[in-house]
């Protein structure tokens, strides 16, 4: 049984306005996505801004209510639970956010930010709180002398480590990391990725890793979902993405990424055409406006996500 | 291709700030030149002084709390920008030296049309009449590949997508045919597909108009893609300069080497391997160590690095490095 199963998840955000505050239009943020995450796996989600990848993460962890569809965690549907029913699941699923500065309370020391979580979820008895905080901080590599300092005294990488310590405080099984290294410099990014990789083994974690950076996802994850306008266009194993990718959008993303070697300079792929409005997604494939392989059929009908190999699904009529 | 004549020469540029904690030197002894038609990359992590360097060239640093060291020289075609008055700067900015910023929405005024903002620079710097100015602006929008330029001319910034806004900012920067374009993280806020458009555009402009470009970025991929020469900065100093090919093939400063190694590599053999990292963090400008500024994070540190501060060495094979023990090629 997969740890997490997502079925036909849909999220529309209504835009209200006018005299009677009626729903004028809807942002189609996530349009019926289905996939599973196995225990111990790191699943990456990539896509450009506005593709619905962050919304997907929030839907899974129940920070947003889905318009339709279902999230099943360890065999139990969690989409329609009440807050108190959700509490035990919250302990098993945690989130790491992009901006560590915005997700830490500036008036709380980093130590108390973590011990608050421990106390709320009654992870350890009150007298062991301090010891547990120290243990967590040493696991993520935060200097123990700085437990009583405030977030503004830390560098970005250190703050992100505190964010990771806080997520791990409840011993979760599943972590959603939403752009955890995007705000960090390259050298710090490498440090934080290494910490995440070590902790994944140490805590036996399963992870959903959301990022716009294909290079990082390709390096770090086992499998990735490529999203576009709320649809999954391709699900592909990492490792050898350049050889395996089939969907023209995935290929365009790969081709638009500069290679960090001036000897291997290549003409960057430039997609022509504009991204369709999320208020009125096209009837057929969402990528029609920019796709080099577009045909009649693509305009008429959304291609289904078809399995091509183990762990490799593609939604395209032409490949 | 880049020519050998220098368009801009920066000599010994030091810039400081008055802060609550006392004065602090943000960049120290920065010297370099930009040649006609080349793209010079400045790379480094946050706080290394790359933006302070570019803003000093435009003299855009706040007057009340920043100061340029009187020894500094920024020579642009016979003008010493470091000591130029505001009137001279006004005639240079937007005309002969232009700048584009990271976030296009903050560079555009939301209450004026695209056309109005393009017209502003043309009105100030050229003697064209209104009709010619509109033609020129529309031609610029077309040059940066904006669809329906004549219609877009009358639209407001919010009606454009992020990539289009950045192209408008580039059109604004280029409408007076500047000799030098300073691009401060021009693609950092953009998606890769849009970044590809912007990089291609900058490369074409350099080839067509021979505009020299200073490209400031933290992304080594972008550097590898379009720069001719590269300056690596660390904690307010230049630590290495070289042409882009030599720098990537054979980095001489340990920091450059470590920076290049910490980029995730694609391919089966690298998949899910631990990334080499630079341990520790950049020192605070208030607590700079004696000796080399990189010593605490350097894998090759010796006693000499602690005792003495290395200087940016003599130019050898068009390269300079600030290290007592520059790395040999592998």
Image (tube, coloured by chain):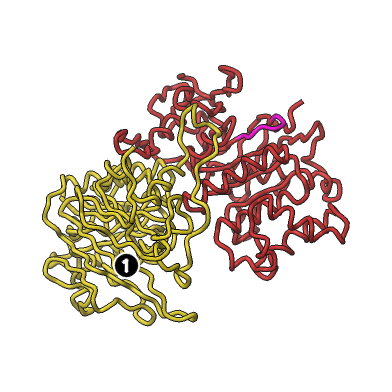
Chain colours: A red, B yellow
Callout 1: SS: helix
- Please state the horizontal and vertical placement of residue B18, each as a whole percent of the image: 41, 80
A170 sits left or right of A312 in the view: right
Q: Label 1 marks which chain's residue?
A: B
Residue B157 location, quadrant: bottom left
Q: Is residue A49 visible?
A: yes
Q: In the image, what residue occupies the spot 71% across and 35% down?
A: A69
Q: Which residue is mark 1?
A: B55
A29 to B71, vertically: above or below: above
B208 sits left or right of B200 in the view: left
> Residue most toward the front?
B303
**Magenta extent:** A38-43
- Please state the horizontal and vertical placement of residue A239, each as a whole percent of the image: 52, 27
- Please state the horizontal and vertical placement of residue B33, each as a whole percent of the image: 20, 59
Q: In the image, what residue occupies the spot 80% across and 42% down?
A: A80
Q: Is residue B142 visible?
A: no
Q: In the image, what residue occupies the spot 53% across and 33% down?
A: A226
Residue B295 location, quadrant: bottom left
């Amino acid at each position: 049984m997969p740890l997490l199963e997502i079925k036909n998840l849909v999220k529309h955000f209504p835009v209200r306005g006018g005299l009677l505050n009626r729903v004028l239009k809807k942002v189609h943020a996530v349009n019926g996505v289905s996939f599973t995450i196995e225990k111990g796996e790191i699943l990456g989600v990539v896509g450009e801004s506005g593709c619905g990848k962050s919304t997907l993460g929030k839907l899974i962890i129940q920070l947003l209510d889905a318009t339709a569809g279902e999230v099943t965690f360890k065999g139990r549907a969690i989409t329609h639970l009440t807050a108190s029913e959700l509490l035990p699941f919250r302990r098993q699923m945690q989130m790491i956010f992009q901006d560590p500065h915005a997700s830490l309370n500036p008036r709380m020391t980093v130590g108390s930010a973590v011990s608050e979580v421990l106390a709320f979820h009654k992870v350890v008895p009150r007298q062991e709180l301090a010891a547990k905080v120290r243990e967590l901080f040493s696991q993520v590599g935060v200097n123990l002398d700085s437990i009583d300092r405030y977030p503004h005294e830390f560098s970005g990488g250190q703050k992100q480590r505190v964010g990771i310590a806080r997520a791990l405080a409840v011993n979760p099984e599943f972590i959603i990391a939403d752009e955890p290294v995007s705000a960090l410099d390259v050298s710090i990014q490498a440090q934080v990725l290494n910490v995440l990789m070590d902790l994944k083994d140490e805590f036996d974690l399963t992870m959903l890793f959301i990022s716009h950076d294909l290079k990082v996802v390709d390096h770090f994850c086992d499998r990735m979902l490529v999203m576009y306008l709320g649809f999954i266009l391709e699900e592909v194993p990492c490792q050898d993405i350049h050889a395996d990718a089939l969907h023209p959008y995935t290929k365009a993303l790969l081709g638009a990424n500069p290679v960090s070697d001036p000897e291997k300079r290549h003409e960057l792929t430039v997609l022509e055409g504009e991204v369709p409005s999320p208020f009125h997604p096209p009837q057929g494939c969402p990528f029609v406006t920019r796709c080099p392989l577009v045909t009649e059929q693509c305009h008429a009908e959304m291609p289904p996500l078809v399995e091509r190999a183990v762990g490799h699904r593609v939604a395209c009529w032409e490949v | 291709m880049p020519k050998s004549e220098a368009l801009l020469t920066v000599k010994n540029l030091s810039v400081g700030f008055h802060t609550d904690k006392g004065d602090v030197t943000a960049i120290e002894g920065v010297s370099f030149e930009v040649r006609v038609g080349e793209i010079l990359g400045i790379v480094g992590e946050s706080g290394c002084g790359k933006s302070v360097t570019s803003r000093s060239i435009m003299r855009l640093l706040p007057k009340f709390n920043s100061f340029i060291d009187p020894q500094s020289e920024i020579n642009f075609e016979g003008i010493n920008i470091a000591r130029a008055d505001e009137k001279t700067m006004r005639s240079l900015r937007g005309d002969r030296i232009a700048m584009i910023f990271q976030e296009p929405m903050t560079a555009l005024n939301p209450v004026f049309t695209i056309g109005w903002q393009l017209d502003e620079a043309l009105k100030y710097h050229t003697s064209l009449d209104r009709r010619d100015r509109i033609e020129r602006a529309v031609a610029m929008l077309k040059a940066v590949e904006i669809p329906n330029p004549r219609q877009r001319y009358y639209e407001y910034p919010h009606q454009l997508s992020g990539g289009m806004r950045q192209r408008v900012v580039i059109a604004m920067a280029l409408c007076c045919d500047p000799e030098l374009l300073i691009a401060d993280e021009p693609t950092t806020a953009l998606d890769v597909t849009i970044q590809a458009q912007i990089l291609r555009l900058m490369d074409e402009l350099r080839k067509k108009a021979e505009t020299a470009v200073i490209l400031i970025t933290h992304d080594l991929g972008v550097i590898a893609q379009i720069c001719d020469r590269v300056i690596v900065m660390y904690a307010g100093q230049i630590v290495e300069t070289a042409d882009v090919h030599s720098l990537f093939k054979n980095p001489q400063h340990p920091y450059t080497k470590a920076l290049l190694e910490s980029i995730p590599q694609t391919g089966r053999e690298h998949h899910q391997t631990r990334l080499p990292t630079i341990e520790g963090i950049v020192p605070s400008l208030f607590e700079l160590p004696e000796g080399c500024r990189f010593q605490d994070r350097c894998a090759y540190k010796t006693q000499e690095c602690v005792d003495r501060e290395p200087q940016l060495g003599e130019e050898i094979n068009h390269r300079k490095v600030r290290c007592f023990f520059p790395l040999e090629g592998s």
